[in-house]
Amino acid sequence: MSEGRSKPSISVRFVRHAESQNNQVYRDARRVYRGGTPEFDLEGWTNYVNERRRADPDLSETGRLQTEKLASYLAPHLHNQASHPVRIIVSPMLRTLQTIAPTLEALKLRHTQEASSLSSSTPPGEAPPPPKFRAIIHGFYHESEGCHIRDTPEAGMNQPQIKSVLSGFGVDSEDILFEGFPEDPLDGWYCHGTGFETRLESETRASKFYLWLCEFLDQQLKLGTEEEDPTCDNDDDDDVFDAGVSVPGEEHEKEHDKFSTRQRRRRTTILVGHGDFMALVLKRIISGFGHYVETEGVSHRSAFVHFNTGITELEYFGHGRFLLMSSNQMPHLSDPGDLALRSGGSLKDGWAYLVPEVMHLDDEVTVAFSDEVNDHVKEQTVALKSLYLQGHPATTSITNTKRRGSTFLLNVEEVEGAGDLDVLSGGSGTTRLCESSDMTFVVKRGLQVLGCATYHHESGTITDVVLRPSAKSVKTGKALMDAIKNYAKRAGKEGTLMLKPSSEGDHVFFAQLGFQEVKDSGEMTTSML
């Protein structure tokens, strides 16, 4: 251990939405039709739910009370202890927007009052303080199963409709960003949905969102990139520091006091989502990329339970490194008089249905923690392509069958300048050099995939080259390309390798890696020598 080494981190909170009308429908159906008992009336339960369930429901009356309590806790806490702006990532579904809206309204009011009091003392020409928050509405972060009524998809809200919901709470349009949405702002976030999202599709989307989240948080920590953060209005990184070390003036601060003003306010990200999908994302966070991937129709082996408005707190240290500080906490509903408002976090709320039957466990594809190439590498590669390659299918499936063929590790010493990077290649059905195979090359650090590319041996072309933005460096790109060259030469390939950049930025990057432009073709080549 390195006790003297600084370990800066940022605070991350997962918050489940308040109770929705659908939550109330399911709870009432379990009570009326005796769910979980030998007298369970499945037909009555099904008819009751089908008549009352909505694709994108409002909050229940209990849920609205929960949001008020949540705002009374989060708003003063974030105002006094978080830096500006707080990044608040929200599912596009109505119940999550309604859950966080009172908190945004309270933060906005506090910010307006603070700005007004400072305006008289602010020197002429000095910029006003940055906004208190940035609301990032993320199209990947919706609940498992999607937006549907009895398998018939609904488009979900579009960007103007979401802005309209939040504007009712005083949130300005300039404080709202959209990620993972259709290109047309008038299209709903689920406009491409085909119906009920399967468990496998939810798992794939969770992997994709988890990769996006790590990249987003890495950029917040400014690790591996000098690019400006579009969600931040200042370049001051004094809010990113080692929170485990006190500085002069902090001697009397109480660690567990969530309301008093801090001398140093911390960079903070809040994620407002849904119980089941949060569990899929947290599974990836806690397991560090190695986890169980379920077969079609089988729920995950373990899950994280959250009450409505339950809060899970983590610290993020960069490169996919998390500490779980607390899980499913309810500080805003801890008074005896508020206990009746707790909902959605007990076995009677149906969480046991997420645990698979024992008979299904042997059918799962398991991922071992070992030095061999595992399915978690395949999953990350699919997510990486889906997230950053234009035209790649958004829901490319992760294999849910027993492993076919094998993959092998190239000798890292052969990759000049690779340093701490491992380069893997995977073909179909053989560990021998095979002239007819398309090979996928992956560059990774530890268990984290940084980039990948596909080499087509017969044509000598390279396609689907993608690197995480925070890891996009000449060193990483060269490690990937040198591995492909070494493989091609060992397989008897001579001459040049060819690829086609998809953007001007890619053109510049590949030129740095030694590729030269082929006139009037849009392609670039590099010598095998």
Image (cartoon, helix red, strand yellow):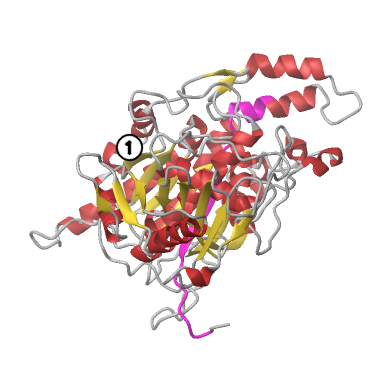
Residue at (84, 31) in percent of width and height: 36
Q: Is residue 178 left or right of residue 64?
A: left
Q: Is residue 228 left or right of residue 208?
A: left
Estimate the x, y position of residue 378 in percent, counting from the top left: 58, 48
Q: Quadrant of the N terminus?
A: bottom right
Q: Nearer the viewer, residue 71 or 444?
A: 444
Estimate the x, y position of residue 490 in percent, counting from the top left: 51, 59
* Pointer 1 local density, CA inside 10 Å: few below 14, some 14–19, many at least 20: some
The residue tagged 1 is 170
Q: Specify the segment rendered in magenta.
A: 3-25
Q: Evaluate whether residue 80 shows in this view.
A: no
Disc 1, SS:
loop
Q: Quadrant of the C terminus?
A: bottom left
Residue at (67, 41) in percent of width and height: 340
Residue furthest out toward the bottom = 4
Q: Is residue 128 left or right of residue 33?
A: left
Q: Nearer the viewer, residue 294 or 334?
A: 294
Q: Is residue 293 left or right of residue 529?
A: right
Estimate the x, y position of residue 384 in percent, counting from the top left: 47, 47
In the image, is residue 17 part of the stretch drawn in magenta?
A: yes
